[in-house]
Amino acid sequence: MIERVHVIGSGRVGSAIASRLRERGVAVDGSDPDVVVICVPDTAISDVARCLAPGRGWVGHVSGATPLAALDPHERRFSLHPLQTFDRSGDPAQLDGAWAAISGETDEALAVARELAETLGLRPFELADEDRTLYHAGAVFASNYVVTLQRAAVRLGVPADGLVPLMQGTIEHGFELTGPIARGDWETVEAHKQAIRARHPELERLYETLAEATVALA
């Protein structure tokens, strides 16, 4: 049972994790912890891990893309990546109901990661270490690139506030494809391309790429 955790890093993820652990009655300090959770930028994980003296506890990181080898020389190690975006508030409610990719090299490591995820209010699923780069790319598609799409839509004249219910509706309707491509209305698609080319040529390639991908995937 995890009773004492040392959280390293107080950024968006680290602050939310520390707050949730305190809510759940887990001691959050640096004295003889059961688990050390490294919540620092990906490029700093290896340096932080090397500075930690090996102890009885487990060492984990919260990166989606970084392999477990970054935690060398520690052998009792795991990763837990919350599949969620975080703001700077440190509000632990951001963790509620989100999924979490857990990776470990032994059943015991996976059990520790699973227990920690459930303590945080996350829904854990196992991710093979060799699959994490593709997994993280998928998460970027679903999160970071949504920001790109929102900004492109605003640039083309859609009110920013009006996009929120539109995007929520797409999610609530089970990601069912609607619009001109679903209807086979290629005349409208071509009209879109011509209008974008005339007024916002920097977005033409993006539109064409997404249209082609939508035909192939949806």
Image (cartoon, helix red, strand yellow):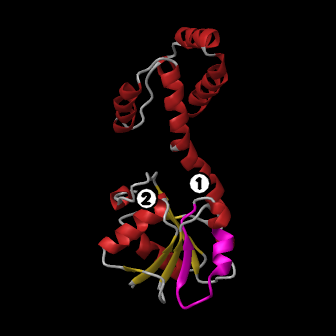
Pointer 2 or 1: first along the chain: 2
- Residue lying at 63% horizontally and 61% vertically, measured from the top left: 42
Q: Is residue 139 left or right of residue 162?
A: right
Q: Which residue is mark 1?
A: 135
State the residue in front, 107 or 55: 55
Residue 21: which quarter of the image? Answer: bottom left
Q: Amino acid at mark 2?
A: Trp
**Residue 124 can be seen, yes or no:** no
Give the magenta part as a residue range: 45-63
Dot 2, crowdedness within 10 Å: few (<14), some or many (≥20)? some
Q: Which residue is mark 2?
A: 99
**Residue 179, horizontal then vertical, whole percent:** 45, 20
Q: Is residue 1 above or below residue 100?
A: below
Residue 25: which quarter of the image? Answer: bottom left
Report how far apart the C-alphas of labels 2 and 1 lie in the structure: 13 Å
Looking at the rendered structure, the secondary structure element under dot 1 is helix
| Number of the label disc, if any, that sits on residue 23 | none
Looking at the rendered structure, the secondary structure element under dot 2 is strand
Q: Is residue 55 left or right of residue 2?
A: right
Q: Amino acid at mark 1?
A: Tyr
Q: Quadrant of the N terminus?
A: bottom left
State the residue in front, 79 or 46: 46
